[in-house]
C-alpha cells in the first residue's frame, strides 16, 4: 500500500494534468489516474471511494496544501483557550480553514469570535507546520497549520450558541482535556504556549 504522501503526489500529478492538458486522450488517462488514487486514499483514510472521489473532483487547478489557522490565546494565569468541537466532542485551539481574501490574522480573530465569543488581537506568528510531518490521524488533504499568538481583549461570561462548538474554557497546558487530534496534538498545544511566553525562541517552521 502506498503512503499517503505518495498518494497525494499521484493526486497532484492527476490534477495538474487535468488542468494543463489539451489532449482528450490524456484527459481520460488523468481522470482514470485520479479515480484510482481516490480508491487508494479511501483505504488509507477510512472513507468510501465514492466520498473521496467526490471530494477530489471538486478540487481544480494545481494542487496545493490547504491552510488551517489556529489561534493561541492565553490568560493571566498562563492557561490556554480551548473550544469543544460539535463534530467530534473533543477540544481544540480555536480555528479552521483559511478563506480566500482573509489574512491569517483575520482568520484567527474571526475564528475566536465565532467559536468562543471572545475578542482578541492577533499579535505574531508562532509556528508554520506541515501536518503530515506530525503524528496526526490520516488525512485526505495535505495541510499547512498556522499557529498565531493572540492577545485577549474581551472575555465572556458564557459560551455563545453557534454551529461549530459546544463550549470553551481555559486549561493549564499540563492538564489538557481530550483533544481533537486531527486539529491539534497535546505536544503542539504545549509548544505553542511556550512560544507565546518566550518570544526569543522565534517561530517554529517545518
Image (cartoon, rainbow, N blue to C red):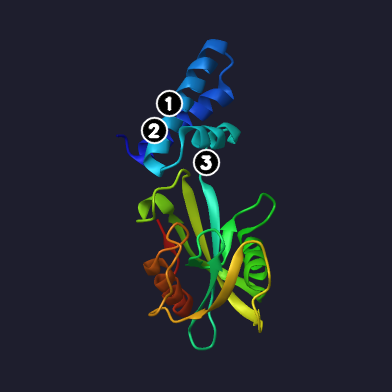
The disc at residue 152 is none
| Horizontal and vertical percent position of residue 163 | 66, 62
145 to the left or right of 154: left
| Quadrant assignment for the N terminus | top left
Front residue of 205/69: it is 69
Distance in Å between CA atoms under marks 1 and 3: 20 Å
Q: Secondary structure at mark 1?
A: helix
Distance in Å between CA atoms under marks 2 and 1: 7 Å
Does 185 appear above or below 16? below
Q: Residue furthest left?
A: 1
Does 59 appear above or below 106? above
| Horizontal and vertical percent position of residue 133 | 36, 52
**Residue labelled with disc 3:** 64
Q: Nearer the viewer, mark 1 or mark 3?
A: 1
| Horizontal and vertical percent position of residue 19 | 58, 26
**Residue labelled with disc 1:** 36
Q: Earlier in the sequence, mark 1 or mark 3?
A: 1
Q: Nearer the viewer, mark 2 or mark 3?
A: 2
- Say which residue appears at 45% left-offset and 75% top-offset: 193
Front residue of 123/7: it is 7
- Say which residue appears at 49% left-offset and 57% top-offset: 145
Observer able to see residue 120? yes
Density class for disc 2 (Cα within 10 Å; few <14, some 14-19, many ≥20) is some
191 to the left or right of 101: left
Distance in Å between CA atoms under marks 2 and 3: 20 Å
**Residue labelled with disc 2:** 40
Q: Secondary structure at mark 2?
A: helix
Density class for disc 3 (Cα within 10 Å; few <14, some 14-19, many ≥20) is few
| Horizontal and vertical percent position of residue 83 | 55, 70
Q: Secondary structure at mark 3?
A: loop
**Residues at circles 2 and 1 in contact by the CB criterion of under 8 Å:** yes
Amino acid at each position: 500500500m502506498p503512503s499517503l504522501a505518495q498518494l497525494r503526489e499521484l493526486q497532484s500529478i492527476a490534477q495538474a494534468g487535468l488542468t494543463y492538458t489539451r489532449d482528450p486522450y490524456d484527459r481520460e488517462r488523468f481522470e482514470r489516474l485520479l479515480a484510482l488514487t481516490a480508491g487508494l486514499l479511501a483505504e488509507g483514510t477510512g472513507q468510501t471511494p465514492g466520498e473521496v472521489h467526490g471530494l477530489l473532483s471538486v478540487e481544480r487547478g494545481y494542487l496545493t496544501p490547504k491552510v488551517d489557522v489556529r489561534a493561541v490565546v492565553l490568560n493571566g494565569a498562563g492557561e490556554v483557550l480551548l473550544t469543544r468541537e460539535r463534530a467530534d466532542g473533543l477540544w481544540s485551539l480555536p480555528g479552521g480553514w483559511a478563506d480566500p481574501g482573509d489574512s491569517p490574522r483575520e482568520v484567527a480573530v474571526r475564528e475566536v469570535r465565532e467559536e468562543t465569543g471572545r475578542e482578541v488581537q492577533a499579535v505574531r506568528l508562532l509556528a508554520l507546520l506541515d501536518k503530515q510531518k506530525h503524528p496526526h490521524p490520516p488525512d485526505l488533504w495535505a495541510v499547512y497549520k498556522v499557529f498565531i499568538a493572540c492577545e485577549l481583549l474581551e472575555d465572556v461570561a458564557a459560551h455563545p450558541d453557534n454551529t461549530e462548538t459546544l463550549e470553551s474554557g481555559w486549561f493549564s497546558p499540563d492538564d489538557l482535556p481530550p483533544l481533537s487530534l486531527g486539529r491539534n496534538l497535546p505536544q503542539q498545544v504545549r509548544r505553542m504556549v511556550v512560544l507565546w511566553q518566550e518570544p526569543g525562541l522565534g517561530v517554529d517552521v517545518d
